[in-house]
């Protein structure tokens, strides 16, 4: 504490200048009835060294995904983040800045965010991107409320949106919380046994405000049918597509097949899974949604000498101006993590992105080959196309296999889909990022084989 | 001028990666990407230099005094950054088994307890990732509580006109009608105005204390009584919690729910706009509604502590997919451990510095005073302020034509971040100052001197400020009218 407060020991002097004699004088305005009478019951202050040692001890009890073969993804992906990224992003001028309300002294940050908007715009092939949402779930939820504001007047299914039934429950829960206040009706679009969206059923969404689907979906499947979706639902229904951004090194950007809004988890660019936060949500859209979109946006401008300059723009959408009529309550966002993503993307470049996507997809092909050659193990979607995740059907509960792999093989085997949908209790979602090598895959396959033998 | 998109190295330039496990992948033909995004092609030294250049054109707390009121721009201890970069934090997956996350959960549990204790609440969730999301989450809990007890007809949320914009925005997102009540002439909460609007339709009142004027609301307990008598809930916007740790707490004031801004009180760096974190605390009658999961602690047969996830029985579900901004929770833990029970001293120094700065500005020497065109007046009359204060710059504007914004821009020339401008809206020509506890007496003295000096400068020079920043005054109207929201790559 003593190394944090520059005026410790000088209180008396400063108080005297103000004609006061004690710190209590500064709190004389707190009525007796609400004063706290006893000191805070908290530990003694610690030094940096003591805190660091304890943090190392406590966090050392966790099992990082990169400390052993780990096949757990399900929305967060462990990609290698170049060393440059955390080093530059934690420069104090970035780390300790506030929202750039004073553009004259914030040109660097503003330019970096404008560059971020450009790279996301290029990645998804839509003209506009904001500076970040909290995560993929709030990005999806606010895309839905944004689309309702834009389309409701002309819609024939008032305040109604359609969502793929494979949007995971934790994301659906966020969507529910964000949409219930506007009385938005959410209808589900079913998927077939092949895991792909039922396009006939999707046709019912015509005249609604929006359709939200994910590519790849929660089973890791790439769905070609989504390319037809926009023509099925029509111009006055927003097509919102959730993406895993790394996949876009190989997979068509949703803007090219008619998406009006693209959202997703930016996390694989810039930061590790970090227990699920801070990460950042992507939000990109066509021009039609600009005035109803949430979040901060940077625009190019001019200074009083006519020189090129950047500034936050379209702030009349925002809560600090529009208050209860704002498009969103978002204020603090995830700018610094988006900056880290920007640095990562800039360093990768176009071909680096493609290589990264190939590493993810190549490991997926190798893992599928190794695992589906094991007798007794089946693919849940034998004809499916996958980017870096796929579902394995097991002869018994996935939870038991995961426990065996964890305890006996030091392998984190994937995600038990029954955590999301109880009926899938023998299905395991396996993810392969660029951090998976052939030995990891062999260890997983070997572990599964051994478990089958033990349980035979 | 460094332009990221001017880096056009050879194909494949950029980040070198290991060979893939396999070159085989299967993407349906129609879904294969035809053209790669036109990202820059640059080597590491070029990218490092680009971002370093950008950083030199940004201003953080590290660059200079940052008296941005309401935002609590305090120093960010660097060990906190080192801690979150440990692999045991950066590389852990929230869906991993609880046995892989015991260290994280231990810290979560300690933070739940600590935050509840400091605010006088019974239960805490760490999930909301920003103050605004904390507000939203708490109002959602109140909404579900009212539905459960048959009070779903309560459809109005009351906010004072001095409230942060997020308060009405968050309540509106939950579907509430907003009732804004005027403050008294001195900026304090007007109990008569409150009495006039509460009723059977009141769901909640949202208020911050100390208020956005930096003044402690003397009648806060009476306000809580009025709202509770009408059957409403009291919500505490914790944006100004930094001022009162150990002195009072929202529980004592009669609040039912509160959010904490870990990026204000607990020093999570602001990062140019985020990440923040907005955990909420609630009294027991609302605890069943908190977002899932919370962390619980049990002692196992061998006497070891074991932490587990726990879903409150009537949980509203989730507001962020995972466990919120865990990294902010960890930093806040490291921050609070540094002060421990002396968090009270932290608040004392925040208040000391704010009062001292106010005193220095408002009591210039006769010599300086004689050179000044006009002095501002207090935004709100008060013997003492808490962690921040407001100035009404109207007298300056009337005497010289220099606006609050002009003074704010001129401060940039002196190497300072400007104070908060034109907020709260109830103070005309408002500048709001919050020095925080981590500024030295010397830095505050110098700032006050420079501020007063600006009031003595040639008004024409101040009106055209800034003069010494990387760019001159930026035309915000041009940006909104032209909407150039990305780099026009093709035109280069």
Image (spheres, rainbow, N blue to C red):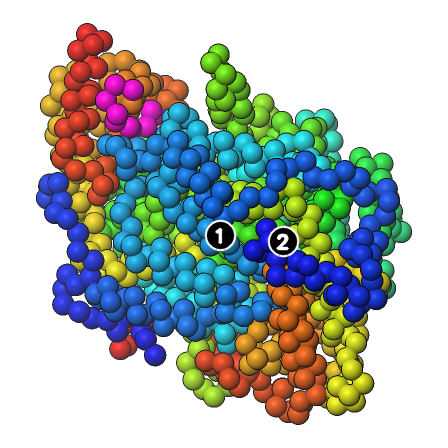
Using residue A362 as the reference point, say whether residue A51 is left or right of it: right
Residue B434, image x and y in percent?
66, 63
The quadrant in which residue A310 appears is bottom left
Foreground residue, B270 or A383?
Answer: B270
Residue A179, above or below B211: above
Q: Earlier in the sequence, mark 2 or mark 1?
A: 2
Using residue A226 as the reference point, say whether residue A129 is left or right of it: right
Residue at the extreme front of the image, as rendered: A9
Q: Is residue B174 magenta?
A: no
State the CA–CA distance, disc 2 to disc 1: 16 Å
Foreground residue, A344 or B234?
Answer: A344
SS at badge 2: helix
User: Where does the C terminus of chain A fall, quadrant-wise?
Assistant: top left
Residue B235, image x and y in percent?
71, 43
Q: Which residue is mark 1?
A: B275
Q: In the image, which residues are magenta?
A: A407-417
Q: Residue at point 25% right, 32% down?
A: A68
Residue at the extreme top of the image, as rendered: A456
Q: Is residue A412 magenta?
A: yes
Q: Nearer the viewer, mark 2 or mark 1?
A: 1
Using residue B181 as the reference point, say whether residue B86 is left or right of it: left
Residue B36, above or below A139: below
Q: Which mark is residue A64?
A: none
The quadrant in which residue B216 appears is bottom right
Foreground residue, B356 or B266?
Answer: B356
Foreground residue, A390 or A222?
Answer: A390
Residue A252, image x and y in percent?
24, 51
């Amino acid at each position: 504490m003593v190394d944090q407060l520059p005026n410790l020991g000088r209180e008396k002097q400063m108080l005297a200048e103000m004609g006061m004699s004690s710190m209590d004088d500064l709190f004389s305005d707190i009525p007796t009835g609400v004063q706290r009478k006893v000191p805070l019951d908290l530990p003694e202050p610690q030094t940096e060294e003591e805190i660091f040692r304890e943090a190392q001890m406590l966090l050392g009890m966790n099992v990082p995904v990169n400390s052993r073969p780990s096949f757990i993804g399900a929305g967060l992906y462990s990609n290698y983040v170049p060393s440059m990224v955390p080093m530059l992003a934690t420069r104090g001028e970035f780390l300790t800045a506030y929202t750039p309300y004073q553009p004259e002294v914030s040109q660097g940050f503003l330019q970096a965010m404008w560059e971020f908007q450009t790279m996301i715009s290029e990645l998804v092939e839509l003209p506009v991107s904001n500076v970040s949402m909290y995560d993929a779930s709030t990005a999806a939820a606010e895309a839905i409320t944004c689309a309702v504001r834009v389309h409701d007047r002309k819609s024939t299914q008032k305040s109604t949106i359609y969502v793929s039934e494979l949007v995971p429950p934790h994301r659906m829960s966020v969507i529910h919380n964000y949409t219930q206040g506007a009385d938005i009706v959410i209808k589900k679009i079913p998927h077939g046994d092949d895991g792909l969206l039922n396009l006939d059923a999707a046709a019912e969404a015509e005249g609604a405000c929006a359709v939200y689907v994910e590519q790849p979906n929660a089973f890791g499947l790439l769905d070609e049918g989504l390319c037809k979706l926009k023509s099925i639902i029509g111009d006055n229904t927003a097509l919102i597509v959730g993406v895993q951004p790394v996949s876009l090194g190989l997979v068509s950007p949703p803007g090219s097949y008619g998406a009006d809004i693209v959202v997703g988890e930016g996390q694989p660019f810039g930061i590790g899974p970090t227990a699920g936060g801070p990460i950042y949500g992507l939000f990109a859209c066509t021009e039609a949604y600009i005035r109803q979109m949430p979040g901060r946006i940077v625009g190019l401008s001019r200074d009083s000498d006519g020189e090129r300059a950047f500034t936050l723009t379209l702030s009349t959408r925002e809560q600090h101006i529009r208050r209860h009529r704002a498009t969103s309550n978002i204020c603090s966002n995830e700018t610094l993590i988006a900056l880290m993503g920007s640095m990562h993307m800039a360093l990768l470049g176009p071909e680096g992105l493609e290589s990264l996507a190939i590493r993810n997809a190549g490991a997926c092909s190798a893992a599928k080959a190794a695992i589906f050659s094991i007798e007794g193990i089946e693919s849940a979607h034998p004809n499916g196309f996958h980017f870096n995740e796929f579902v394995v059907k097991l002869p018994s509960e996935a939870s038991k296999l995961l426990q065996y792999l964890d305890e006996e093989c030091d392998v984190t085997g994937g995600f038990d889909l029954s955590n999301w949908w109880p009926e899938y209790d023998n299905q395991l979602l396996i993810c392969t990022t660029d951090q998976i090598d052939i030995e990891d895959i062999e260890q997983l396959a070997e572990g599964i084989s051994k478990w089958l033998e033990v349980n035979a | 001028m460094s332009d990221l998109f001017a880096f056009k190295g050879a194909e494949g330039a950029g980040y070198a990666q290991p060979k893939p496990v396999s070159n085989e992948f299967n993407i349906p033909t129609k879904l294969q990407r035809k053209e790669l995004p036109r990202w820059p092609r640059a080597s590491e030294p070029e990218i490092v230099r680009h971002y370093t250049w950008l950083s030199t054109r940004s201003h953080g707390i590290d660059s200079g005094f940052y008296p941005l009121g309401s935002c609590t721009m305090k120093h960010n201890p660097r060990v906190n950054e080192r801690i979150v970069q440990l692999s045991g934090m950066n590389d852990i997956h929230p869906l991993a088994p609880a046995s892989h996350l015991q260290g994280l959960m231990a810290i979560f549990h300690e933070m739940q307890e600590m935050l509840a204790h400091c605010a006088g609440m019974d239960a805490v969730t760490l999930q909301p990732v920003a103050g605004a999301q904390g507000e939203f989450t708490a109002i959602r809990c109140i909404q579900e509580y009212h539905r459960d007890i048959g009070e779903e007809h309560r459809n109005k949320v009351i906010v004072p006109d001095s409230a942060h914009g997020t308060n009405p925005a968050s309540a509106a997102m939950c579907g509430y009608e907003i009732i804004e009540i005027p403050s008294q002439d001195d900026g304090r909460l007007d109990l008569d105005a409150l009495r006039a609007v509460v009723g059977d339709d009141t769901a909640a009142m949202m208020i911050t204390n100390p208020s956005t004027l930096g003044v402690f609301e003397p009648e806060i307990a009476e306000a809580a009584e009025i709202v509770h008598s009408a059957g409403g809930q009291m919500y505490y916007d914790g944006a100004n919690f930094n001022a009162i740790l150990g002195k009072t707490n929202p529980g004592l004031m009669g609040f039912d729910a509160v959010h904490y801004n870990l990026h204000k009180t607990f020093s999570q760096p602001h990062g140019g706009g985020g990440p923040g974190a907005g955990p909420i605390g609630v009294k027991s009658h609302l605890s069943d509604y908190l977002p899932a999961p919370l962390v619980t602690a049990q002692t196992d047969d061998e006497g070891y502590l074991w932490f587990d996830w726990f879903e409150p029985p009537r949980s509203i579900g989730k507001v962020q997919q995972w466990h919120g901004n865990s990294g902010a929770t960890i930093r806040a833990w490291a921050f609070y451990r540094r002060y421990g029970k002396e968090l009270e001293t932290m608040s004392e120094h925040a208040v000391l510095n704010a009062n001292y700065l106010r005193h220095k500005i408002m009591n210039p020497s006769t010599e300086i005073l004689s050179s000044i065109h006009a002095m501002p007046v207090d935004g709100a009359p008060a013997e003492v302020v808490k962690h921040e204060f407001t100035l009404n710059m109207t007298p300056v504007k009337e005497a010289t034509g220099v606006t609050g914004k002009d003074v704010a821009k001129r401060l940039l020339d002196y190497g300072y971040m400007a104070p908060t401008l034109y907020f709260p809206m109830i103070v005309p020509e408002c500048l709001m100052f919050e020095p925080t506890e981590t500024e030295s007496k010397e830095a505050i003295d110098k700032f006050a001197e420079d501020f007063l000096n600006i009031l003595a400068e040639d008004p024409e020079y101040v009106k055209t400020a800034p003069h010494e920043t990387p760019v001159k005054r930026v035309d915000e109207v041009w940006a909104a009218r032209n909407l150039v929201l990305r780099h026009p790559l093709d035109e280069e």
